[in-house]
Amino acid sequence: MIDQDGYAEAVLLFDGQLSAIEREFTSDQFEALVAGEEDLGEYAASVVRAVFVVVGAALSVRAAVFFTFKVNEAGNVDAHFNLPLRYLADNAGPGPDLGTGEIRLACRGRCPVPWHSVNLWEPREDAESGSIQIVQKAVWRNRLALKPWGMLNRNATAGDLVLEENRSPVRRRQLEGRLTETFGEQGRVSMEGLIRQNNERLTEVSDKYRNEMAQQQQGYLEQIKNCREEIRQLKSALRHEQERSRRLQALLRGEP
């Protein structure tokens, strides 16, 4: 469930309308499904749309692979399923920013391995019920109790870990509040939240641009100052050489 870099992995299954997450599995649980150790009777004889997610600190989605798989009449995952989900996640291109920087995104139109694109699907990107936002909301709810290392101090003692466990309900409520503020009670995007986030981002970009322009302007002024000083020195040296040349010519003519 946790890879070598401290990120947790999970597989989430969408409902038929792609409006909510219906089932959630850790990567180990999903591998057991693929191996035929468990079944998905409720999805028998269907094609399931799912997403493989890599989760980092603060339960933020860092990578997502939107894929499909077949379930036969007996409720078992198709034995020919062989998508390299971790590889696709590691090599996916840039996706949207969910608040902690751009995630890596692999889907039908953005597949790092072209021949696997037929087994991927295109997430919905509409403002009210985007698939990626639905995924992040489900991860924040953390029904799988994911614990990526980035959420804890890697040097923590056992007592520290117990304390972190005791704090987890508070942390979940904080995350829920943040989520509801942005996406609303039904997981829909709050226009006020989006406008506020957009204004904050614009202010941040504007401040950064002004600071960069001020630094560039100061750099140009310093260059101009240095160039003027160099010109002054060259003019002084030229006058000195001209005066020296005049004296030598006068000596050659025998003038005092």
Image (cartoon, helix red, strand yellow):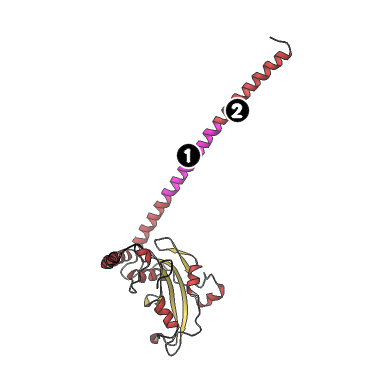
Question: In terms of sequence position, does the residue under pointer 2 or pointer 1 come before the other?
Answer: 1
Q: In the picture, residue 114 is in which quadrant? A: bottom right
Q: Nearer the viewer, residue 158 or 81?
A: 158
- 89 vs 110, nearest the viewer: 89
Q: Which of 15 and 152 lies nearest the eye of the viewer?
A: 152
Residue 218: image tag: 1
Residue 111 spot, x, y in % from top left: 52, 71
Query: What residue is shown at x 33% (from left), y 65% (from top)?
Result: 179
Q: Which residue is pictured at 25% across the width and 67% down the height? A: 166
Instruction: Determine which quarter of the picture holds residue 237.
Output: top right
* Numbered disc 2: secondary structure: helix
- Residue 17 visible (yes or no): no
Instruction: Report the side of 46 relative to 235 (left or right).
Output: left
Image quadrant in which you'd find residue 2: bottom left
Residue at far bottom of view: 74
Quarter holding the N terminus is bottom left
250 lies left or right of 161: right
Percent x, y of residue 252: 73, 14
- Say whether residue 160 is visible: yes
* Label placed on residue 248: none
Q: Residues within 10 Å of mark 2 (few under 14, many from 20)?
A: few
Q: Which residues are magenta?
A: 206-228
The percent position of residue 69, horizontal first and vertical second, equals 47, 81
116 vs 179: above or below: below
Q: Which residue is mark 2?
A: 234
